[in-house]
Image (cartoon, coloured by chain):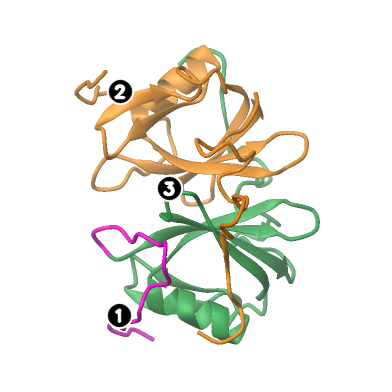
Chain colours: A orange, B green
Amino acid sequence: MTADPVTAAAPDGLRFDAQGLVCAVAQQFDTREVLMVAWMDAEALRRTLTTGRATYWSRSRRSYWVKGETSGHVQRVVEVRHDCDGDALLVLVDQTGPACHTGTRSCFDDEPGASRRLSTSGS
Amino acid sequence: MTADPVTAAAPDGLRFDAQGLVCAVAQQFDTREVLMVAWMDAEALRRTLTTGRATYWSRSRRSYWVKGETSGHVQRVVEVRHDCDGDALLVLVDQTGPACHTGTRSCFDDEPGASRRLSTSGS
């Protein structure tokens, strides 16, 4: 489903970028594992807060997506926090199954045969 | 110090945005607390990997900044990972003192008298 972005009032203290977006970091609420990074506009945030399901804005598809809507790997929202300068969100969730479309629990986990670690020795 | 961005080769698998940036999530390596979100270009990432000190690109000041260079609240880099689609970084660090310029440990922590939690009841 492709949709035009919807205008929603931003909560106080938030600063969206020129594209109307803030970076959203999804973290498993109990283990504190960072699961993924995605984007929200004011409407995605409003839906996230009101439905309790993490909802993001896809920059490539230009549409809203409810995490897990297709895969079943939903994120139940426990808490949403913003940072000191209001341009990033921390979304504490309870993740069902893998967060990553590749099947790994976190989008930062290694895949079999493909490390996602960058070398810290040399450039 | 204001500097022009420096051209550095991006590691394989990374996709920088139109401004040449990726979102970088700094996480305390042992407690898994999410400390802050900032931005890196290829050169900031190169410096981070080669010096072992988290170095970011300030979008507002248009300059590189070594985290803690002024405050002493440095971030020793333990590991840098990228996500599945290469447009976000997870920087595992050992944070000295508070990460936030307001004095809180994390940029997502409440300040005295100012909650950074967004309501999940109603819009």
A115 lies above or below B7:
above
Numbered disc 2: what chain?
A: A
For the residue labelled by badge 3, is the local secondary structure a helix, a strand or a loop? Answer: loop
Few, some or many residues within 10 Å of mark 3 (<14, 14–19, 20+): some
Whether B85 is drawn above or below A63: the answer is: below
Residue A23 falls in image quadrant: top left
Query: Is label 1 in a helix, a strand or a loop?
Result: loop
Residue at mark 3: chain: A
Task: Give the amino acid at mark 2.
Answer: Ala
The residue at the point 35 percent across, 81 percent down is B8
The residue that appears at 66% across and 46% down in the rendered structure is B109
Q: Position of residue B50 (x, y in %)?
A: 56, 85
Quarter of the figure with residue B123: top left
Q: Are marks 3 and 1 in contact (CB under 8 Å)?
A: no
Residue wearing tag 3: A87
**Given the current orientation, which residue lies at the most extreme left position?**
A4
* Residue B111 visible in the snapshot: yes
Q: Is residue A7 left or right of residue B75?
A: left
In front of the other: A46 or A113: A113
Q: Is residue B8 magenta?
A: yes
Q: Is residue B80 above or below residue A74?
A: below
On residue B5, the disc is: 1
Pointer 2 residue: A8
Residue lying at the far front of the rendered structure: A113
> In the image, A51: left or right of B72?
left
- The residue under the point 35% across, 63% down is B21
- Which circle's residue, 3 or 2, is located before the other in the chain? 2
Look at label 3 and name its amino acid. Asp
Identify the chain of the residue marked 1, using the numbered disc in the image: B
Numbered range of the magenta stretch: B1-19
| Magenta segment main secondary structure | loop
